[in-house]
Amino acid sequence: SEALGLVHEPLASAGPTRFIHAALEACRLAVPLDGAWHIRVTGGIHIDGQKVGLGGSASVVSGVVACWKQRCDQEGSVPWTQVAIDAHFKASGSRGSGYDVATTSTGGVVLYRPSTEEGGVAQITRLQWPDGLHWTAGFCGQGVSTRVLLAKAKPGDRAPLVAMREGVFRLVEAWTEGIASNILERLRSLDPL
């Protein structure tokens, strides 16, 4: 990856190539294939040298799994998105919900419920985009680390998480109704955490 400064870098289970390594290993376990692979990552979103946190590792894992799926032609027999979620979780040091991988693999707006069972499969539903709702992305000029933000949370204080969960449930309800004004009202009613 020229974007990551890794040209002809060998794959390893640790370090900067760990996401590619984990994706290939998970795919090999799902459906073994013969042959060698050459992986080239051409993306990477950086602004003024800062990573903007838009799921780069999720995109890499999803892309590798999608290529493997296409190569082995095993569309319906393997839960490929779950293969990608599990690979990303492993490469992330057993952190993360898998939502970014599910969204990257599925595309669009996704309702995601992770599996609560070991070896289970997440429930992923692609939602329709409501008429009259428009979206744009912006960057405030400063990247933010999820890990640092979570470390600031008070241990044992679940109230912010409960409030966020309830707000998201109300937002999903409005989204599935498909009325843009209701969605915007639900977004405005979310308390900043």
Image (cartoon, rainbow, N blue to C red):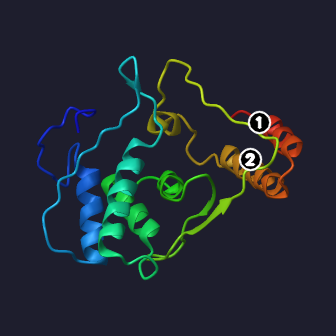
Residue type at tag 2:
Ala
Left or right: where 119 falls relative to 38: right
User: If you read the primary sequence from the N terminus, does the residue marked by circle 1 or circle 2 appear first?
Assistant: 2
Q: Residue at x 30, y 39 (%)?
A: 42
Left or right: where 8 falls relative to 157: left
Q: Residue at x 59, y 48 (%)?
A: 156
Dot 2 crowding, Cα within 10 Å, few <14, some 14–19, many 20+: some
Percent x, y for residue 183? 82, 44
* Depicted 124 relative to depicted 170: above or below: below
Q: Which mark is residue 191?
A: 1
Left or right: where 183 falls relative to 68: right
Task: Count how many numbered circles sit on residues in the image.
Answer: 2
Residue bearing the label numbered 2: 163
Percent x, y for residue 133? 78, 40
Residue type at tag 1:
Asp
* Depicted 32 relative to depicted 173: above or below: below
Disc 1/disc 2 C-alpha distance (Å): 8 Å
Q: Quadrant of the N terminus?
A: top left
Is residue 55 something that shows in the picture? yes
Q: Residue at x 85, y 57 (%)?
A: 177
Q: Say which element carries label 1.
A: loop
Q: Residue at x 13, y 63 (%)?
A: 36
Q: Quadrant of the C terminus?
A: top right
Percent x, y for residue 60? 35, 49
Q: Say which element carries label 2.
A: helix
Q: Nearer the viewer, residue 121 or 159?
A: 121
Q: Are marks 1 and 2 in contact (CB under 8 Å)?
A: yes
Is residue 94 something that shows in the picture? no
* Depicted 67 relative to depicted 73: above or below: above
Percent x, y for residue 76? 46, 80
* Depicted 190 relative to depicted 96: above or below: above
